[in-house]
């Protein structure tokens, strides 16, 4: 798994999930963020906390370090809760309890559980593309980059199993975010394979089909780890998969099948 899409396609992973589902812009023509329900415990309107905390009520994006930390805590809690329970079973209350914040605080940063879910799918793509890019940037040899990219992918999946499950569930919860996630990867992958073929480091071939095939190998091994509880060491999986990628199933010339 070489470099993933970090260019043209990368931006499409963010925001498509919510917009493409046909939801109206918050607040109608004025574009204002909808008012959240009052905090059940205090009766306070969360919008007042937005102003007091120095946050941007129109966008939900924090302007202060404390606000950024709170938003991050909610996202990380949502990753754990939705990853464990699934989207339908997870509630905003369970997410805020996990984050250690009041339920009304959630609405300062997110309009709904759907919005958090879409953000988590987009974040998985951003984080994973960055991890793979970091792991492969020093390799001019495409085959070596494939090896190290696959290793980075499996290491990331091992470290973020809940986030990986969320992306898989997006196929049923937020199909547009799911499609954007994989199309972004495929576009960057295809471009990388085309460059490698043009430079002569790999054989020419259909880069589109190759990209989806290599992504399929990585994804299946990720599911083996996270969904099926596979306990084979990552290095072993990488070695076996990379041998298949580099050499295929064909017996070496001059060797018997049993050698």
Image (cartoon, rainbow, N blue to C red):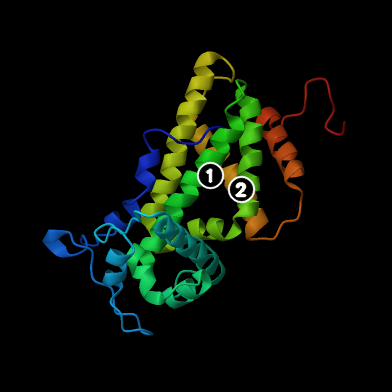
Q: Is residue 137 above or below residue 4?
A: above
Q: Is residue 1 visible?
A: no
Which corner quadrant holds the N terminus?
top right
Residue 257: x, y in percent? 83, 32
Labels 1 and 2: the sequence-earlier one: 1
> As drawn, is 259 to the left or to the right of 67?
right
Picture residue at 75% right of the left edge, 42% below the top: 235
How far across and down, in percent of the image, does residue 107 sit?
33, 69
Q: CA distance from mark 1 to mark 2?
A: 7 Å
- The correct choice, above or below, for 100 with respect to 205 in the image is below
* Furthest residue toward right: 259
Say what secondary structure mark 1 lies in: helix
Quadrant in the rendering for residue 150: top right
Q: Secondary structure at mark 2?
A: helix
Q: Which residue is mark 1?
A: 128
Kindly check if marks 1 and 2 are in contact, taking CB atoms under 8 A apart as contact: yes
Residue at 42 percent of width and 41 percent of height: 184
In the image, 256 versus 116, the foreground residue is 116
210 and 228: which one is in front? 228
What residue is pinned by disc 2?
156
Q: Which mark is residue 139?
A: none
Q: Residue furthest left?
A: 29
Whether residue 37 is visible: yes
Q: Position of residue 169 (x, y in %)?
A: 48, 61
As drawn, 47 above or below 129:
below
Q: Nearer the viewer, residue 197 or 57?
A: 57
What residue appears at the point 60 percent right and 20 percent down from the top-left corner? 140
């Amino acid at each position: 798994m070489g470099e993933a899409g970090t260019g043209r396609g990368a931006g499409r992973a963010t925001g498509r999930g919510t917009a493409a589902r046909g939801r109206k812009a918050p607040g109608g023509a004025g574009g204002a963020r909808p008012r959240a329900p009052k905090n059940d415990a205090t009766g306070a309107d969360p919008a007042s906390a937005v102003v007091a905390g120095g946050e941007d009520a129109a966008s939900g994006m924090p302007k202060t370090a404390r606000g950024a930390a709170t938003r991050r805590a909610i996202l990380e809690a949502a990753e754990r809760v939705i990853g464990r329970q699934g989207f339908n079973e997870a509630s905003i209350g369970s997410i805020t309890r996990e984050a250690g914040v009041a339920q009304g605080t959630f609405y300062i940063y997110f309009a709904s559980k759907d919005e958090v879910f879409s953000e988590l799918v987009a974040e998985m793509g951003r984080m994973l593309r960055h991890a793979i890019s970091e792991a492969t940037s020093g390799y001019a040899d495409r085959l070596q980059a494939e090896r190290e990219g696959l290793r980075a992918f499996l290491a990331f999946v091992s470290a973020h199993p809940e986030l990986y499950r969320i992306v898989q569930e997006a196929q049923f919860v937020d199909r547009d975010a799911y499609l954007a996630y994989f199309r972004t990867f495929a576009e960057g992958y295809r471009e990388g394979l085309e460059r490698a073929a043009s430079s002569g480091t790999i054989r020419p071939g259909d880069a589109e089909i190759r990209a989806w095939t290599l992504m399929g190998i990585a994804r299946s091994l990720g599911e083996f780890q996270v969904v099926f509880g596979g306990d084979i060491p990552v290095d072993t999986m990488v070695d076996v998969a990379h041998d298949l990628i580099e050499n295929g199933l064909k017996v070496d010339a001059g060797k018997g099948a049993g050698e």
